[in-house]
Amino acid sequence: MSESPKPVVVVTPAAEIDYTRDFVALPREYGTRRYEARADVQAIRAAVWDNLRQLDARTGFCSRIDGKPVILKPNLVTVFHWLGTRGGDSPETTDPRVIDAVVTFFQQYTRRIIIAESSGRGMPTAASFKIAGLDRLAKLRGVELTALEEQPVDRYLLPKARVMREVVVPRLISAAVRGEAFFVSMPKLKTNLYTGVTLGFKNQMGVLSYNLRQRSHHHAINQKLVDLLYLLRPDLVLIDGIVGGEGNCPAPVEPVQSRVIISGNHAVETDRVAARMMGFDPAHIPLLQLADENGFGDARVEVAGAARVTPFRPADPALMGAWMQENFPNVRVLTGHNGGAACLPPAAGWLQAQENACRGGCQASTRYAFDMLYYEGKRRDFRLTVITGTGVEKNGRRVYYDAAGNEYSLQDIHRLDGKKLAVGACTRALKDSVTRHIDGCMPFPNAPHMVVHQLSGTTCAVISPRNHFLLAGLVATLRACERRKAILRTGQRIDTPLQWTDTPDLPRAFTAEEMRCDYIAEPFAPLTRAEIRALCAAENRNVLATFFP
């Protein structure tokens, strides 16, 4: 077997000017001479082109395109541009000025470029394209836009995977899996509530179908993302670090003038360099640790350019930490995880370990709800008890802990006064003892956010007239639902079944020969008429559940 190409990462600084203008959405002047003459536009294009030319000189990646379609996968999970949150813009998504520069570079080597993405559930990609101005970019540059959630899916099994042994991806992505298209991951340089950082191969979460994205989005999220590398490894990663984002993505984040473009032909090693440039030790990032343990790292990596460190503030997923106590002083949080049962007093850091036992699931999703209320400028003096986890088995009973380390039994929780919210499938035993229970492992991503609004008596700014794109988003949501149902009516699947509990992903047993394969293509059977009716009805329910959980 021939050795894989040597990993190369290229770091290119951008000119030392201010880039915090139009870093989320293209302005109306885009496509005019005035826009092209702007110093920031010229500097970004120069940095991107210089970076990719250097990478090509060291790896020859341009020759591998050979006229193939190029799929550009930016990160557009939520384009925070006048959505009703404070500050107007947040550097959450790939800078459209960077996307434009990358498009013009690749047009030298192919006639077909596709910008493909699937934004988060509740934020249809067609709306994200419009908000970011990519609809105008596509028209000007003659490229395609593809909302991946509006495509039929192909099914694959991953025999070597530890968590995600079944994967479905949109049909367009299968072209990249087969090597028929050149796949470019284009993330933003930013921190993340669920995984610490969200860079090149974390960006691949956006190629998964809605329901599959939620499966194993809990304590095993890092392994799930590593497993996906058995199926899909980007041909190239280009990280937009022009204006980085620090804070609690997917909630709004704060800008960091990092002024850099980072690219590489190896997703894990490119992410490792980027994490180090953010001031983080890659050895302490579980996502990168697991990639190494699973054999996806490569110590031969060559780094070209000065990898200057610009410290980023890390994400803070704590529900019991100082930020929550300062901003939501009347919110009591109770947590208990059997997975963290060894982390009990008097062990050092036991309470934080208890909280973080399921960082990739309900903890971060619930913290997102409070971050959103903060950025929406809502009142924060309301009283509420929030509960996550199954409870810890202790002396024959289940107990939860508050921020002071006090124990609460199920009976204690039942007797608590005031409104109570239990989040996740783990808390089902409390369903009759609380005001609201949100099911799922993990729940719909926006569900805790909307339920906290309901229980606190506050309105959501994102679904109010403060959101300049409210109507466009609602229309796009309904259109996406109808397009998805139209695919189902042809007998083709668009997703896996929604999984509400933490159940092992074991689609079937594998033979010894199959265990040597990275992936196996295994198509779904055509849908029956009864399945089509049920799945179309589920699409309608899922749209409503996003806004009214």
Image (cartoon, rainbow, N blue to C red):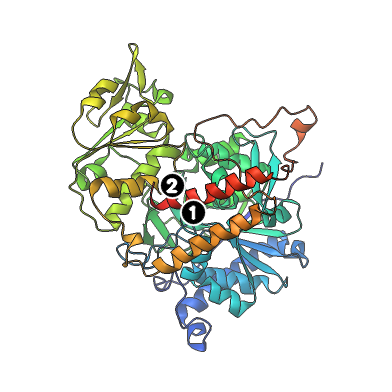
Place of residue 352 in the rendered image (x, y in percent of width and height, measured from the top left):
33, 32
* 143 sits left or right of 242 in the view: right
Place of residue 542 in the rendered image (x, y in percent of width and height, measured from the top left):
48, 49
Place of residue 375 in the rendered image (x, y in percent of width and height, measured from the top left):
30, 57
Q: Amino acid at mark 2?
A: Pro
Question: Can you tell which quarter of the image residue 410 is in?
Answer: top left
* 446 sits left or right of 161 in the view: left
514 or 526, which lies in front?
A: 526
Question: Can you tell which quarter of the image residue 150 is in?
Answer: bottom right
Q: Is residue 68 above or below residue 232?
A: below
Q: Are marks 1 and 2 in contact (CB under 8 Å)?
A: yes
Q: Amino acid at mark 1?
A: Gly
What residue is disc 2 on?
A: 445
Place of residue 77 in the rendered image (x, y in percent of width and height, measured from the top left):
48, 57
Label 1 element class:
loop
Disc 2 crowd, CA 10 A, few/some/many (<14, 14-19, 20+) = many
The residue depicted at 63 percent of the width and 50 percent of the height is: 494
What residue is disc 1 on?
A: 120
The residue depicted at 44 percent of the width and 41 percent of the height is: 443
**How far apart are labels 1 and 2 at the CA level?**
8 Å
